[in-house]
Every structure is written in C-alpha cells, then in structure tokens.
Image (tube, rainbow, N blue to C red):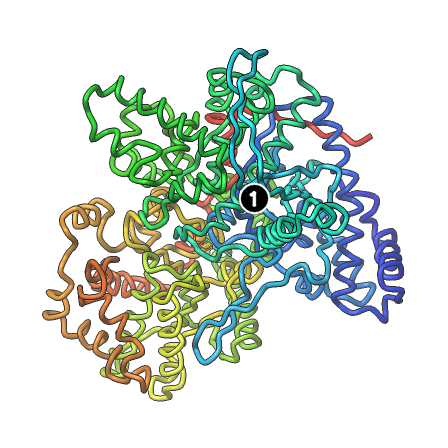
Amino acid sequence: MTNEMFKKEAFKKSVKDNVKFLYRKTIEEATQEQIFQAVSYSVKDVIIDNWLATQKAYDEQDPKIVYYMSMEFLMGRALGNNLINLCAYGEVKEALEELGFDLNCIEDQEPDPALGNGGLGRLAACFLDSLATLNYAAYGCGIRYHYGMFKQKIQNGYQIEVPDNWLKNGYPFELRRPEYAKEVHFGGYVRVEYDPEKGGNKFIHEGYQAVKAIPYDMPITGYDNDVVNTLRIWDAEPIVDFELDSFDKGDYKKAVEQENLARNIVEVLYPNDNHYAGKELRLKQQYFFVSASLQAAIAKYKKKHDDIHKLYEKVTFQMNDTHPTVAVAELMRILMDEEGLGWDEAWEVTRKSVAYTNHTIMSEALEKWPIELFSRLLPRVYQIIEEINRRFILEIQAKYPGNYEKIKKMAIIYDGQVKMAHLAIAAGYSVNGVARLHTEILKNQELKDFYEMMPEKFNNKTNGITQRRFLLHANPLLADWITEHIGPDWVTDLPQLKKLAVYADDEKALQEFMNIKFKNKERLAKYILEHNGVEVDPHSIFDVQVKRLHEYKRQLLNILHVIYLYNQIKMHPEMEFYPRTFIFGAKASAGYATAKKIIKLINSVADVVNNDTSINGKIKVVFIENYRVSNAEWIFAAADVSEQISTASKEASGTGNMKFMLNGAPTLGTMDGANVEIVEEVGAENAFIFGLSSDEVINYENNGGYDPNVIYNTDEEIRQVLMQLINGTFSNDTELFRDLYDSLLNTKNTDRADRYFILADFRSYADAQKRVEAAYRDEKGWAKKALLNTACSGKFTSDRTIQEYVDDIWHLDKVIVRKK
Ligand SMILES: *Cc1c(COP(=O)(O)O)cnc(C)c1O
C-alpha cells in the first residue's frame, strides 16, 4: 500500500520543487547534500500526514502512553529507514535514478544523529521502531545535544576526537515545537510557609536560575501501518531577554548566568559508556530533560483527564538506566507542589508510574551523587529524596528489625551520597535486567537485598534489535533472498525465519546464502579500501569485533591473539592457515587512557602485520574509523565471525551479538549476556564458546582475583606475546605499551592484575579460534552454521522485547491509525 506521493512522477516533481524552493536551483545545479535535503522534505511531507492521523487516532482512542526516558537515542540515519518503513524504498530509488541520482549516495549525505554512545542508546532507538510498528502509543524523551558522539579520526594510529556538528546544515527530520516549551529551575533555596487552607506546610522554591526547554520532535514511523510516534528531544534557551529584563533591573550577573546555563546544558553528550563521571553538568542535563518531559506528559494528561490521582492508568515512565531516575522525585514535586496532592497520594501515583531498567552491575558505572552537589543544584528535589529515604529506611527496619547492615546496604542516601539505583528500585513498580543471565546476577548477587525485600518487582526483558534496520535496510540482498524463500512476514514476525531451517542441507540454497555473504564482503572491502586505504581479500575470513572500546569487552584479548597467530605463522611458515581479516571498530571515551592505548596497539599491530610480506597476506588487521550505526549496518552484513568475548558476567546483554546473528555470522564468545540465549537458540554446535563462566569469574573476584603470573611463567607463547608489547616489536618506543603490559601482570598500578581475566581465558580463546578455522574450511558445514544463525535469530527482535514490556510492565493497548 503505497502512498500517492510515492508514485514516481509525483515524487520527482516534489523533489524538484523542494530544490527550487530551498536553494533556488534546478536539479542539475544542486549538490548531493542539497538533493538529500530536498528528498528528505518530500518524504517528510508524507510522514506529516501520517503523524497527524496518528495524533488524531490517539486523541480519539485515548490509549495509555509509555514515555521512554533515555539520555541517549542512537538513531542512525533516518531517510533510508523511513523509506523502508513507509514501504517506498524501491519506488524512491527508481524515481531518483530517473533524475540521475543514486539513493545510496543520497543516503550517504545524511549525518548520523549520534545522540548516543553505544548499546544503551541503540536499544532505545530499536524500541521506538518496534513500539511504532506494533501500534503502541509512545514518546521517546531525550536531549537535543548540539554535539553528539564525537567523530573519530585515526592519526598515526591514535584516536583523535573531532566535534560532530550534526546540525550544521539543518536536520530535515525534526520539528521545532516552541508552543510546548517548559521552564526548568536550578539552584536557589526552599522557603517553607504554613498554608492555612491546606492545614500544612507549603514549599516555595526561590532564587533559582531558570532555563527554557524547547522540544524538537522527530517522527518515528512504524512499518507499513501509518503509525508515526514521536521522539521528543529538548533544547535549552535562556528564559529572559537579556537587555529588556534583567539588564534594566541591574541583575546583569544573573542574566549572564542564565544565558550560559542554557548554552552549556545541551551542548555535548558525555562520551562515557558504562562509566560514571559524576560531573555537575551531567546532573543538570538529567534534571533538565526529565523535568521538561514530566511537565509535558502531565499537561497532556490533564487535557483529557481531570483526576491526577489516576495518572498511572494512562501514563507510564520507563527509565533507561538510572540516568533519568531523578524523575521519581520530580514527579513527587510536581504532584505535591503544583497539583496539591499530599505525600501519600503523590507517592501512590509515583510508585505506580515509574519503572526502571538496569543495564550494568559494574561498580564504576553506578551513579552516586554527592549530597552537597545534589542539594545545591536541586534543593527541593533533594528534600523530597530525603523524605523518600527516611520512609524507605522505616520499611527496611519494619522488615528486618535491628538489622543495620541492611540499612547500610540499601539506603538511598548513605555515606554522603545519593544512590540513584536505590532510588529507582525503592520507587519503581518494575525493575528489569536486560538478559536472563544478567537478571539472575541482579537477583542473586548485586541486588540480592532488594530482591529479597521486593521480589515481585524483578523481571527479565532480554534485549532485541529491529530487523527493519539491521536486515531489511542493511542487507537488501539477504532480505530479498529470505522473502523469496519464506515470504515477507518475517519483517514484522521475525520467528518466521525458523522456516529457513529446511534449507540447512540444501546445497543450492547454501550456495546462494554464501554468495550473498561474499557480495556483502566485497561491499565492505570497497568501503575499507576507500576509508582506510587497506586492501582486504573478501575470500578471507572476516572476523569482526565492533563495539565501544572497553576493557571488559576485551579487544585486548583479540589483538593479543592476533599477535600470537602472527608469531605462529612466522615460526612455522609451512603451517596451514586460512587467511583472516581481523576487523575492529570502536570509539574510546575521550578520557579513558587505557582504551585509547588499546586502539593505538591495534593500529600498531596492523602496521607491522599488514606490511610484513613474509606472511603472504595471511593476516590483515583493519581498524575502521568512526564506528557508528550507518557503517555498522554494512559491517554486520559482511561478517563471518562475531566476536563477543567480554569477561563473563560483565556484558549485561549486548545487542551487537544479535545483529551479527541475524546476518548469518556465528558467535565466537563467552557465556555472557545474551550470548547464553543465542547459543540456546542456535545450538552449541553453531557457535564457538570459550572461557570462564560468570560463576567462576564472580568466585575469583570474591576471593581477591587470580594470579596471571602463573600463566605468564608457564606458557612460553603467551609470555612471548606479552614481551612483544615492551620489546619494540610494535613500536620503537618500548614504553608505549608498558601500561597495558603492567595491567596484565603487575599489581602495582591497579588494584588487581588482569582484572578482566585475559590471560586466564587466552588458551581457551585460541582453541575456539582454531575450531573456527577448521569449521570454515568445511565450506558446506560453515554455510549451514551461518544459515542456521539467521534462521534461529527470531527471538532477538525488539518486537518480542517490546511485547514483553507491554504484557508484563506497561499494559498498553494497540491503536489503529486509519487515514480518511
Ligand atoms: C549495536 C550497536 C552497539 C552495541 O554493540 P555491543 O556489541 O552490544 O556493545 C554499539 N554501537 C553501535 C553503532 C551499534 O549499532
């Protein structure tokens, strides 16, 4: 069912008109970037009609709405995705061809709105796609960072961070909505006044600085259902007009402060992934978007409903990690101070309205704010948290009389700090982990005390990904092939892929499947040649690790193993060795020195290995610059092997693992996160599993770690690899990689040597890599494994994840959008 607009002639006319109106140019004179803008506006025209129809349907049907609150939305490009979801990709491609343009090149003009770091932000984006596709009313709530994730350049092997000015040409898929602006207040003090009407105290916030929050809406199109939901991201502007107001009153300093506050607050996304930095500006960002989003949600509710006590019947707030947890206290504040509810009434509404998703158990990622900072920045909100804490401690005492250990471990405020996870759990009606293993660790270890006190809140929602972006758009050859074999229903019903399993022994089908993989490898090889200047052979095994650079993800294990293989080939030139291309892609947080050093090591090893003619190109190492959603799509489609090698227990779920599987790449991984469920779906014989289990890792950790020196002293080949970090093999500067060497062996700089069990798992990893090679030599056997990975990936659609959130947590109703 194609929109009239997408009839070729109408679409071509619309694009030509847009070029004329926007740029006063003819289509022949326009640049590719201008064509991108013009095409996007033509597509937006269609979307706007559906957007209006969706709002009308929501007005009429009054469904419960989920507000998905997240500091990050890693959306990826919108143009191609919108065309896919509007079922107009093919027609628009043809129309543009007739105008003399290649849709792929036009898509390539769009910046990635990189409003997220990695997995957590991409999860939020996949969830919005699934919510719209499944006909649920949803808003994404976030921040319109002017500079999102930095652009990564590699210079001399080092990561250089370049500002990502994604808004510089204007972003066509957003709509400024100044009529829905809200005010957000920071600092000041709270005056308490007796209110005779209420018969109680009134709390008045005074002396604050104010910022105006302006929403920008981005359309979220559902697949083939006319639904268009909204991602609402907030920008900040100063509230007073400098000259006219405060300047005249002589309050010059305050006016400047408010101006600066607004300018700073939405300037940049903090580039930390799975790491807490504790910066004041970060807390400002959190409160800013949470307060504005809650105010907007309540205003919308009140337009249709007059009883605020029943807010939770029509509205639910999902907090993506603890970043938006200040929502608990802000909702209490609005309900009490602005809506006039008493504490107990407000608490009743709040605890039925907010739910929390936990994304990590790593202590360095847990948000704790110093009381001093928190109470100074948000004095009224802090007062409320104190009271929530006081009452929560009474509950703990009632349940565990005299047990002060419990209070120490569970209190929301303790030891001078506000613990955001504790606040989220104490207040939320649901606490979920993001993969089965992760949720079990939460229940049995990290959050054991909370689980024992309130087991009914805890549940698991294994993450998922959208097949519309990561197969239908990313891998059109495979998508078409699948549709030819099992029909098109998999696009909205991914478990249908199971039907492909009947082709697992069909030689023709396997051949076609691997031919498609080969074409995708050629496409990636071309990208690598253009962007890295490195020639890679698409006949080699494409062994891929792309994800944020983090010690727990163990890119270091991967590159140390590459060094080990290189040594083996040099030592035994006659040895059978199937050519391999090791592909890395990873951004490191700008302040994470070890992570940046690992990037330098990967590039240094690449320099040596790629240029050593004595190994006949048997190993190539490629570091793909600026890993992001748009190049990720091509990388997944081209991968033979999916490296998911985190230290067991550290990766809560992972979602990259699912994208590889969907595209037919077997997992080489530890029993961590969702890998456990991937193996369960595809069968252990179609994956390559190695390493310590999460129980073993946790056991070591609880008993002071392990001693990597035993391995170093007894395993000569491992010792050689480590020595090469400091003997000039990969850098003339023998001190360059000393820190990495020390982190593995020396306890003097770190609290523990080899915190991430790299040496402990090395042999087991090398073994699994041998099994990969052997399996790949068996062409048919490998094709079968690859195909079965795709066939068994149905569980990992975010459509399934979202339906579970709806059934168990949110309880939303489906909305049907009908255009007249
Ligand atoms: C999926 C995705 C991630 C998450 O990858 P993991 O391997 O799960 O850490 C990060 N960045 C981008 C661009 C992605 O598409």
Residue 327 appears left or right of 414: right
Q: Cβ(mark 1) to ligand 1 < 8 Å?
A: no
Q: Percent position (x, y) of residue 638?
A: 50, 63
Considering depth in this image, is 44 or 206 the residue closer to the camera? 206
The image position of residue 278, as x and y in percent, is 41, 50
Residue at coordinates 43% horizontally, 54% vertically from top-left? 273
- Res. 223 image quadrant: top right
Report which quarter residue 132 is drawn in: top right
* Residue under numbered circle 1: 486
**Does 690 sit above or below residue 537?**
above
Quadrant location, the C terminus: top right
Give neighbour class at mark 1: few <14, some 14-19, many 20+ (Cα, 10 Å).
some
Apparent side of residue 757 relative to residue 281 in the rendered image (left or right): left
Amino acid type at image mark 1: Ile
The residue nearer to you, when weighing 777 against 799, is 799
Q: Residue at x 87, y 59 (%)?
A: 16
Q: Position of residue 319 (x, y in %)?
A: 48, 36
Up the image or down, 177 lies above or below 561; here it is above
Tag 1 secondary structure:
helix
Q: Is residue 504 visible?
A: no
